[in-house]
Amino acid sequence: MVDPAQRLDARRDVLLEDGRVARVGTKLTGRGAQVVDAEGLVVCPGFVDLHVHLREPGREDKETIATGTRAAAAGGFTAVCAMPNTSPVNDNSGITRFILDQARRAGVVRVYPIGAITRGSQGEELAEYGDLKESGCVAVSDDGRPVASARVMRRALEYALAFDLPVVDHCEEPTLSDRAAMSEGPVATLLGLRGAPAAAESIVVERDVQLAELTGGRLHVAHLSTAAAADAVRRGKARGVRVTAEVTPHHLLLTDQAVKDSDYDASTKMNPPLRAEADRRAMVEALRDGTIDAIATDHAPHTVDDKKVEYEEAAFGVVGLETAVGLCLDRLVGSRLLTLPQLVGLLSTRPTRAFGLPGGTLARGSPADVTVLDLDRTRKVDPARFQSKGRHTPFAGWTLKGAVVMTIVGGQIVWQERR
Amino acid sequence: MSGYPHRHLLGIESLQPSEIVAVLDTAEGLREILDRPLKKVPALRGRTVVNLFYEPSTRTRASFEVAEKVLSADSLSIAASASSAQKGETLLDTAKNLEAMNPDMIVLRHSAAGAAHFLARHCRAAIVNAGDGAHEHPTQALLDALTLRQRKGRLEGLRIAIVGDLLHSRVARSNVWLLSKMGAKVVLCAPPTLVPPGIEALAPVTHRIDEAVEGADAVMMLRIQRERMTGAYYPSDREYHLRFGLTEARVKRAKKDVLILHPGPMNRGVEIASEVADGPYSVILDQVTNGVVVRMAVLLLLLGGGGADA
């Protein structure tokens, strides 16, 4: 069992009862309990993905709450935070309740809705955070688009304090990233594609960190991707600003060169875009030094039609729920950039703390949410076998060592790999 | 016979110098056909070529059409609109529909970079990139090289300035690749707002046109693509012409036998003064003729129509 919250990395039994962790110890026996033999496997507190697009309501052709949560379970996530850029936008309690109802009906993993920062995510008037919180939202975000106005962002950070909600910003200066299809740089130049400079992200991260400092609000930076932005977060944390940040597996493992190597394959197109090698390394460094709190997927499923067009026309976003854990085990732990407890912390303990969610540990009394890993199992990424409706990933064909073999939510096995 | 082992022509970047030479030599061998009283050979009889143009083009399209006719290919030109407002059918659907007619080749002009690669991935026909966004325009670079080689006898060691809107120019990218692969010394010149980041990895960049033109064997002027400008890259046409335009006084800094090339259409009085465009060193009209023979060569090499004995 690896449980960073208890500083535990040892051989243990865990007894789950009535949806809670009843006991952790050695040689436990439970009368009439179902026994799962995890010999040779690693038992972790359930993984939590802070950044997922489930597309429902509105774009059920891309994903539904049922398919998205199945993908989460298959990927080892026991809970996902659902971004509000659905249609209609989740900017009111009616939509929030609908999402929670659908999640309950699907009955797979926990879904924590994120409400909009502004009405319709238009960037102008604040949404009703009190209602959103009361109906179940755990954070607010206009993800997919930035909060362009510094004044609105300031008010959001301030007002959210009343409900202790983190404000999650998609940091992008739109006048700099105007119509960009990828990151600006030598690769974009050779491909003839319009690029967004790294500064389009870091300018807004700097702004937001200063606004969080000004207001005392809780800022969470979504999908950090540039060295300068990581540095802004690092300096903010050093000053005691309440800022947390997440990074995606693709920004940890790929660069803009992937766009060229794939010959304009839209599976390499997402926002923020894949960056330069120096930025990629800075992301790994920021993970290692604690600047980044969470690995989140930015799982953004699209239909084949949205992607099978000219690169500039293709939709932004790739799926990530079913590849993230394998990628991190193989490329981060396998190559000794992170220890296994560090990785579990980034997928479980620290993201739950960042958003104030239950779980993140298997201490007695915690929710019985468990992810079980087999560090020796090798698997090839095959989009045809995804539970998600989305098939676009830049990692298709990669062979990864280390895999999720079982996912338990509230004491129920919701996903199990055949041995 | 070919020396050109690829199925498509998508860009210059992926070509070997020997393959570039193969195209130029083939083109040279075809030139005399245009001087015959009956300008037609049966090399591509029974072959079908579709010219699919999503952007307005006069000379590139006409040039491909003439090349196809001289070689007796059956050809069909389609002017489509790629603007999102008029978007109905996707590029892929259009191409698939055309493919149902079994063409041997599709010549594609499109505003999106990578559009030709996209078709090459999804279609059976040979694809010729006739310009994709700001990415590449390989036949333009080949015809420019043919023009230079014809006049100077070689490409290696030539000092060549490429001047103008580098940011939006596919012609610049294809030419930088081709000329540097062939051993020419290229200098790039543009106002800083029109220099794409990282291009200096391919060739040195200067913002002073006088420096770029100094001692040049040839100056390639790039059109200011006003239709692609989304913001103010330079204050006015007047200032552009004064600071970055090719004037007679500036031409004097180049070698005496300098050649002036322009892919057209020209903005007279902006990037190039009329006296220069119409002057004795201008080979702009040679470029048009060479455009036809280079495209004939590409058609033959890709469709394997029998080469120089045609």
Image (cartoon, coloured by chain):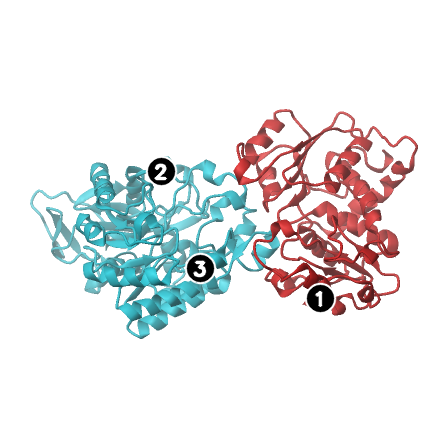
Most extreme residue toward the bottom is: A239
The chain to which mark 3 is attached is A
Report the residue marked by disc 1: B243
Q: Answer yes or no: do the residues labelled 3 and 2 have beta carbons within 8 Å?
A: no
Residue A291 in sight: no
Q: Horizontal and vertical percent for residue A189?
A: 60, 56
Mark 3, residues whose alpha carbon is within 10 Å: few (<14), some, or many (≥20)?
many
Q: How far apart are marks 2 and 1 (CA)?
A: 52 Å
Let me know if marks 1 and 3 both belong to one chain.
no
Camera-side residue of A3 and A139: A139
Chain B: drawing colour:
red
Q: Horizontal and vertical percent for residue A205?
A: 39, 64
Report the residue marked by disc 2: A59
Let me know if marks 2 and 1 both belong to one chain.
no
Q: Which chain is cyan?
A: A
Q: Residue A173 carries which label?
A: 3
Mark 1, residues whose alpha carbon is within 10 Å: few (<14), some, or many (≥20)?
some
Q: SS for tag 1? A: helix
Q: Residue B141 carries which label?
A: none
Residue A216 in sight: yes
